[in-house]
Image (spheres, helix red, strand yellow):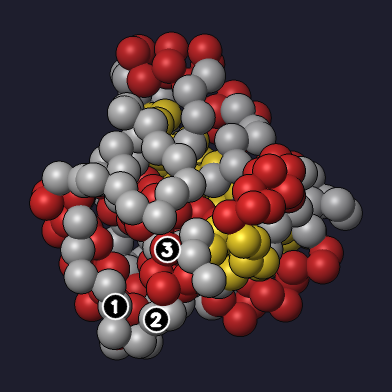
């Protein structure tokens, strides 16, 4: 994984520090392996490090069919959590296959108006604010977003002194030990990268346009060499 701070791009070769790299899972193609690092580590570090997920946790994932969300559903089940997945109608069966226990179709129902009691709400697409999700959190529950917002930052600074409910921001870090853990799970068949489409390097702009349309199911991959 390239450092998020130094930036990156699509190229045949990249120089990285050893601590940011790991051996490719033996049971994945190169395209499948390319879909793992950023998305899967974001999901892992959000749920494990920020959410302190454990067996019995009640988790809601907004954007459960996307790149990060599809990994989050699978990782949450490894930890023994109960997962409610928020996605569009066309992806209901998809997230069920990933392991979701309950699915909310956001085109038909506003998940922020549903039953409360979630120990973790992971907004993998950063579409709903802490204020909107707060009523659904259990006492000492945590809301996690992938993008900073003024409300989230203020809540992080204030802490949980008001009502025990917390807000966290996941800032994914390149970490070989996490890649090794993901490889262990992948080779054991516990998680698998879900790929929407693969583009050649010459169509990188089209790949980004699909990503920005926010309708991808799983990850979009660019093949840099034929």
Q: Earlier in the sequence, mark 1 or mark 3?
A: 1
Residue 114 image offset from top left, x and y in percent: 71, 49
- Distance CA(mark 3)–CA(mark 2): 9 Å
Q: Return the mark for residue 34.
A: 3
Q: Using the rendered view, name the quadrant where residue 133 is placed.
A: top right
Q: Quadrant of residue 174?
A: top left
Task: Compare residues 169 and 53 and report the one nearer the observer.
Answer: 169
- In the rendered structure, the answer to whether residue 194 lies left or right of residue 209 reads left
**Residue in view at x 29 percent, y 84 percent:** 26
Observer-nearest residue: 30 or 142? Answer: 30
Residues marked 3 and 2 touching at CB (< 8 Å): no
Circle 1 residue: 25
The residue at which mark 2 appears reads as 28
Mark 1, Cα crowd under 10 Å, few <14 / some 14-19 / many 20+, is some
Let me know if residue 168 appears in the view: no
Residue beneath the point at 20% across and 70% down: 23
Residue 199: percent from the left, percent from the top? 64, 61
Q: Using residue 89 as the reference point, say whether residue 189 is left or right of it.
A: left
Residue that lies at the very extreme toward the right in this rendered image: 108
> Counting residues from the N terminus, which is met first, the one under dot 3 or under dot 2?
2
User: Of 28 and 96, which appears nearest the observer?
Assistant: 28
Q: Provide residue 225's location: percent of width, then percent of height.
A: 49, 65
Labels in figure, total: 3
């Amino acid at each position: 994984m390239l450092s998020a701070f130094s930036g990156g791009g699509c190229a045949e070769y990249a120089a990285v520090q050893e601590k940011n790299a790991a051996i490719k899972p033996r049971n994945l193609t190169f395209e499948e392996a390319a879909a793992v690092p950023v998305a899967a580590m974001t999901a892992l570090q959000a749920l494990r490090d920020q959410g302190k997920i454990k067996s019995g946790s009640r988790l809601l994932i907004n954007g459960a069919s996307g790149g990060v969300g599809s990994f989050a559903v699978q990782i949450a089940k490894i930890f023994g959590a109960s997962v409610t997945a928020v996605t569009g109608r066309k992806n209901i069966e998809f997230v069920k296959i990933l392991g979701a226990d309950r699915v909310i179709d956001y085109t038909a129902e506003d998940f922020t108006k549903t039953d409360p009691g979630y120990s973790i709400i992971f907004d993998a697409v950063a579409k709903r604010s802490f204020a909107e999700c707060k009523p659904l959190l259990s006492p000492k529950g945590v809301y996690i977003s992938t993008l900073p917002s003024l409300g989230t930052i203020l809540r992080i600074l204030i802490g949980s002194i008001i009502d025990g409910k917390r807000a966290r921001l996941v800032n994914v870090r390149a970490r070989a030990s996490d890649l090794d853990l993901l490889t262990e799970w992948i080779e054991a068949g516990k998680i698998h990268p879900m790929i929407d489409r693969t583009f050649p390097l010459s169509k990188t702009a089209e790949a980004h346009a699909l990503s920005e349309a926010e309708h991808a199911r799983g990850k979009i991959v660019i093949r840099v060499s034929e």
